Image (cartoon, rainbow, N blue to C red):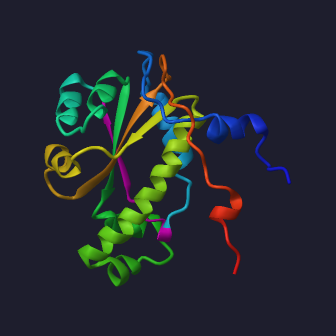
Amino acid sequence: MSLALDATAQDLLFREAQTANTFTDEPVTDEQIQAIYDLVKFGPTAFNQSPLRITLVRSQEARQRLVAHAMGANGPKTLSAPLTAILSVDLEFHEKLPQLFPHAPGIKDAFFSAAATRETAGTQNATLQAGYFIVGVRAAGLAAGPMTGFDFTGIDKEFFGDGKQKSFLVINIGKPGTDAFFPRSPRLTFDEAVTAV
């Protein structure tokens, strides 16, 4: 069975796309990032929560603050990338639900008055949005290098001192550089990953 998306687009987004480990020095513009966001914001989240927040790390000063919390090779990779994004969950996303889910404004208090509930739901849905964001970066003809090898508690203190955001992923973004990709690792087959009941 063929997909509605043509093979070239499938290759761009999935089959030929890989995590980049090196980048050229070609800048990633604000216009590119806005185009990415304006596309991926339409990806679904529960109750249209949209809890993902993206912090763009552009200045050398901010980059140094970030890599102080990096593990191993993630520091040098981040220093060499033209743009880095910190992805975090807005722990007070519920405040925007009357705007984002206007046909049921009462869910803000009915479902999300407890901080622990907000953190669980927000983290689930922000993680979902992170996947959309990576695909959006690829749709822009750029490469993404997502990393979890960071001290996220340290990042939160460094960048989000008010405790209202909780980081969970750092992504380097740009055009892939020399020897950017490791050999592609195997994937599970359909039969290994999918069952019917």
- Quarter holding the N terminus? bottom right
Work out which residue is located at the far right of the displayed protein and give it: 1
Residue 190 picture quarter:
bottom right
Could you tell me which residue is drawn at 58 percent across and 29 percent down? 141
Work out which residue is located at the far bottom of the displayed protein and give it: 110
> Quick check: 141 left or right of 121?
right
**The magenta segment:** 46-57
Residue 163 within the magenta-colored segment of the rendering? no
Residue 78 picture quarter:
top left
> Quick check: 84 left or right of 136?
left
> Quick check: 153 left or right of 56?
left
121, 164: nearer the viewer = 121
Q: Residue 175 at what x, y percent from top left?
A: 50, 23
Could you tell me which residue is drawn at 49 percent across and 43 percent down? 37
Q: Residue 133 at what x, y percent from top left?
A: 49, 45
**Residue 137 showing in the rendered view:** yes
Compared to 167, does 57 lie above or below?
Answer: above
